[in-house]
């Protein structure tokens, strides 16, 4: 079973890399909240020895995209209802809140780190008060997406995770300057950050690619 899981992860990684490389050639990098929280999610899931790391990453990406799309209304939603009209604002703060909520559910032992990252991300946005309120709303949206995704997949929500004392590999990743190719998503992140894309476009690509990789991983694991 361990061998099958390892092979499944490698296959998913190769597919993710191939999809991103086909869609997004390299160019000068530009950072944003979506990229920042993707990096946090990649580090969290890459350090986890739980066999559902690929699904965890997909859950974060989907929650970020759905929360942003709820505000901006550019795409057809999958887990949330469509607003009658877009709210006319960027959904970055909502994406931050959604990513924080899902990761805190999946890795409760590292909530202090996530809380600090949440505060830093919201403080970097232009209007801190509005961003903070939007972040709270984003956590609510992220919770709805996470619950809907779990229900659709028939998965329990109370999965055991690393204790609060910490995972040495996670601690190293969180304090390092960057993960050195732990997963295909680290390559995806560098590729996406090199494109002049709107944050919601980046969030959508992360969600699509990680969902595809997660499905391949799951199919291989159950095969």
Image (spheres, rainbow, N blue to C red):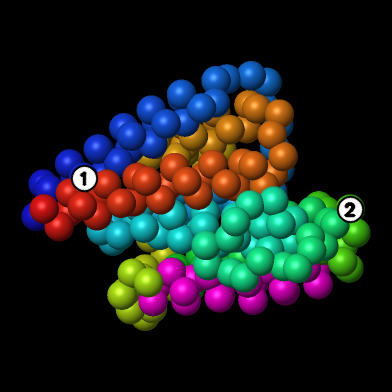
Q: Nearer the viewer, residue 166 or 100?
A: 100
Is residue 18 a member of the stretch shown in magenta?
no
Residue 140 in view here: yes
Q: Residue at x 15, y 57 (%)?
A: 222
Residue 93 in view here: no
Q: Main secondary structure of the magenta part?
A: helix
Q: Nearer the viewer, residue 129 or 176?
A: 129
Q: Residue at x 31, y 32 (%)?
A: 14
Judge left or right: residue 169 versus residue 126: left
Q: Could you say where residue 83 lies in the image, as x and y percent from the top left?
A: 72, 67
Q: Residues within 10 Å of mark 1 (few under 14, many from 20)?
A: many
Q: Secondary structure at mark 2?
A: loop
Front of the two marks 2 and 1: 1
Q: Which residue is mark 1?
A: 8
| Magenta-tinted stretch | 132-151
The circle on residue 83 is none
Q: Could you say where residue 124 lies in the image, as x and y percent from the top left?
A: 81, 52
Q: Quadrant of the N terminus?
A: bottom left
């Amino acid at each position: 079973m361990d061998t099958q899981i390892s092979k499944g992860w490698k296959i998913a990684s190769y597919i993710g890399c191939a999809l991103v490389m086909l869609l997004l050639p390299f160019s000068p990098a530009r950072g944003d909240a979506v990229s920042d929280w993707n990096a946090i999610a990649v580090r969290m899931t890459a350090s986890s020895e739980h066999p559902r790391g690929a699904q965890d990453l997909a859950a974060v990406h989907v929650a970020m995209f759905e929360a942003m799309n709820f505000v901006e209304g550019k795409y057809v939603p999958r887990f949330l209802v469509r607003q009658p009209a877009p709210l006319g604002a960027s959904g970055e703060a909502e994406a931050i809140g959604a990513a924080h909520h899902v990761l805190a559910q999946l890795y409760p032992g590292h909530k202090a780190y996530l809380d600090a990252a949440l505060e830093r991300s919201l403080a970097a946005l232009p209007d801190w008060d509005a961003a903070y309120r939007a972040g709270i709303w984003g956590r609510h949206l992220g919770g709805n997406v996470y619950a809907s995704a779990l229900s659709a997949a028939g998965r329990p929500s109370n999965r055991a995770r690393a204790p609060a004392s910490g995972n040495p590999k996670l601690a190293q990743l969180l304090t390092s300057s960057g993960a050195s190719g732990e997963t295909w998503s680290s390559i995806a992140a560098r590729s996406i950050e090199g494109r002049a894309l709107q944050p919601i476009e980046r969030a959508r690509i992360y969600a699509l690619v990680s969902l595809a990789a997660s499905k391949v991983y799951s199919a291989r694991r159950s095969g």
